[in-house]
Image (cartoon, grey):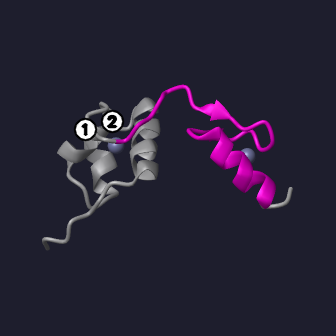
Amino acid sequence: MSTRQVVSIAQCDRWRDARRDGVDYDALAADTPFSRHTVESHVSGRCSHQQSDSGMTCPRCQETTQNLPLHIRACEGGGR
Ligand SMILES: [Zn+2]
Ligand SMILES: [Zn+2]
């Protein structure tokens, strides 16, 4: 019960995206082990995840990434 779950940056990102699509906090929390309050904090930016709303777009795969240099390396390393 007291297992401490950590919200990953991917989770944080997913919540923000879903929120932008109009999904409400209760629905977002229902999908996860986290409380509605936790979801709210992350969506509103009161968390330690560094995110810029303007992610950069990878010129190779057109994916949005927060760390382009790192992503490019993985992208190129993974063949085409
Ligand atoms: Zn967060
Ligand atoms: Zn890429």
Q: Residue at x 29, y 55 (%)?
A: 30
Instruction: Give the vertical position of 62 relative to 33 (above or below).
Output: above
Q: Is mark 1 within 8 Å of ligand 1?
A: no
Q: Amino acid at mark 2?
A: Val
Measured as percent of width and height from the top left, residue 20 is found at: 44, 30
Q: Residue at x 56, y 38 (%)?
A: 66
Q: Quadrant of ligand 1?
A: top left
Q: Secondary structure at mark 1?
A: helix
Measured as percent of width and height from the top left, residue 33 is found at: 27, 61
Q: Is residue 57 left or right of residue 80?
A: left
Query: Alpha carbon of mark 2 to alpha carbon of mark 1: how far?
Result: 5 Å
Measured as percent of width and height from the top left, residue 57 is found at: 68, 33
Q: Residue at x 32, y 58 (%)?
A: 32
Q: Residue lying furthest top in this view?
A: 54
User: Do tag 2 and tag 1 residues touch (Cβ < 8 Å)?
Assistant: yes
**Residue at the spot of label 2:** 43
Q: Residue at x 20, y 52 (%)?
A: 35
Label 1, residues with CA under 10 Å away: few <14, some 14-19, many ≥20: many
Q: Is residue 19 left or right of residue 70?
A: left
Q: Secondary structure at mark 2?
A: helix
**Residue at the spot of label 1:** 40
Label 2, residues with CA under 10 Å away: few <14, some 14-19, many ≥20: many
Give the quarter of the image for residue 58. top right
Nearest the viewer among 43 and 19 is 43
Give the quarter of the image for residue 64. top right
Indicate yes or no whether the magenta region holds residue 70: yes
Nearest the viewer among 2 and 51 is 51
In this picture, which residue range is highlighted in magenta? 49-77
Q: Is residue 19 left or right of residue 59?
A: left
Q: Residue lying furthest right in this view?
A: 80
Image quadrant containing the N terminus: bottom left
Q: Amino acid at mark 1?
A: Glu
